[in-house]
Image: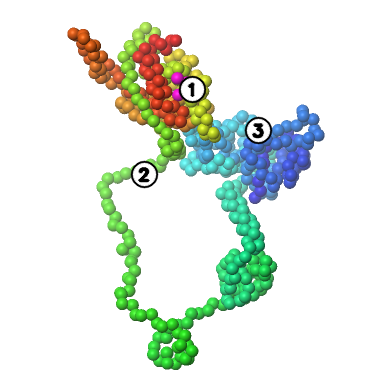
Amino acid sequence: MSTAVFLRRNISRRILARSAAPGASFSTTATPSCSLNSSRTFAPSAAFSVCPSSWPASTKRLYSCSSIQFAQEDYPPHILFPMPALSPTMDSGSISQWLVQEGDSFGAGTALCSIDTDKASVDFEAQDDGILAKILLQAGSDESVAVGTPICVVVEEEGDVAAFANYVADSPAASKDAAAAAAVESKEEIKEDSTSSVASPVTSMSGGGSILLPSARHLAESKGLDATVLSGSGKGGRVTKGDVMQALVDGSMPALRKEEPAKAPSSTNDQAAAPTTATTNAVPPAPAATTRAHVPLTLQDLVAETIHTTGSYEDVANNKMRKIIASRLTDSKRNVPHFYTAMPVQLDQIMKLRKQLVNEFDVKISINDFVIKCCAMALRDVPRVNATIQNTDGAIHVSETVDISVAVATPTGLITPIVFGTDQLGLAEITNKVKDLAGRAREGKLAPAEYQGGTFSISNLGMFGIDEFSAVINPPQAAILAVGGGSRRVVPTPYVDGAVDQKSPVIQTIMTARLSADRRAVDEPTAALFLSAFRQYMNQPQLLML
């Protein structure tokens, strides 16, 4: 098995040169496709030129290449398409549907299959023309495969399709194990060479005088052979592992002699019959055991008693999306220093404006849409909260645009589609965009660019009857706002000192907004300033027109 580099452009238009890479061999026949075998491994998505430096710049082309596992050389020229990484966070995926069948031809931009990523189902489009010769990963499998695993075979000639009827791709794990074994063997050889230059203890297996290195002794003993008869080629005549391996090939090592230990005499007559020297050097017998012999436990003693419970249940396998969400939330809670600030927000003015918009303009704006717009305006006023933390160097990146991620519950898990440029949109535009994104999110039809990124997140559980809760930050964002439902509460009025008649308490609709912030980017005063700005816009919605 060798490493191959497949070019994403049409092979019939390639311009090949033997000077592209050391050890590379190119097929320059008139066939419309060619293979590229090289002992040199290219990094994924690397760019290299296959034109000599003497060619004019207008003739040279740069091609994008990826390192994949190439098939046996007796197959016609072909390309193995690997499982693509359709998002920066995707490390595995599964195929839900093949849109092109075996033997069918396709062109550039044709969707070959639908791939279930960690968030949605995305179509995998071909970058060039070809014919699908063999499908290596069938659709509908619940088990995901790692990115880079071959999923299909593509050829350029229709006559080559039949040659791949029984083609089976080698497992990527097998090639990795072989490479790891070769690396370990190489390290052992280097280690032995370096060990042979230092002093080694004298090791004898059967009384011989040869000096054996530990690796040589272990190898000989594992084969049941005596290596002390060998003449070592190491420093000072030491027998190395290489000497033992050569002796195994030549068959020049005798069998290992095992000395049997002396048996203790079993009776008085045996002791009398033994020679005087043997009785003199004999080890005195051990005293008789006075304790009872240990009785081994049976299998029945080790089996725990089965506890029978009433009722029936069903084991439901967790899907891939929920597993990834759980993993990322765990990483966020472990690595991100969360702190929380909460503030009550009055909704009476918002509800009054909603009723006015419905009665006069027949426009329905939800409370959540007002929350999104007010958050966008508060982020514009307090830009420090509208920040992300870079994973590379930990730098704080304060974004100039306000892109709010809105949490949407789907049958397979939680997803956060993004409303881009939220501060520049009107209430009606926000309503339409949120409805469109939420609908396509529940159907699994969001593109990766529509849910990856964002500068701030909002999670609203008010429609489920939740008064308040704490949300987990979605890295690399610096904050997330958790919004509960509104409830009627009695709110006391301020006491006026010296006044005879004090104002009576009033009943207001109050919503609790709780901000979860990353302490590395947002401090407590900044969080309080943001919540104050958010409450100001919610209490006076006419400010949203500014």
Q: Residue furthest right?
A: 54
Whether residue 101 appears in magenta in the rendering, the answer is no
Q: Nearer the viewer, residue 370 or 441?
A: 370
* Mark 2 Cα shell of 10 Å, populated few (<14), some (14-19), many (≥20): few
Q: Nearer the viewer, mark 1 or mark 3?
A: 1
| Residue 480 can be seen, yes or no | no
Instruction: Give the residue number, with chain letter if any, for mark 2.
Output: 315
| Magenta stretch, residue numbers | 382-386
**Visual colour scheme:** rainbow
Residue 281 higher or lower than 169, as above or below: below
- Residue type, mark 1 in image: Asp
Where, by quadrant of the figure, is residue 529 drawn?
A: top left
- Residue type, mark 2 in image: Asp
Mark 3 and 2 residues: CB-CB less than 8 Å, in contact?
Answer: no
Which residue: 53% across, 39% down? 91
Residue 496 higher or lower than 304, as above or below: above
Q: CA distance from mark 2 to mark 1?
A: 39 Å
Which residue: 47% across, 88% down? 278
Which residue: 62% across, 75% down? 209
* Mark 1 Cα shell of 10 Å, populated few (<14), some (14-19), many (≥20): many
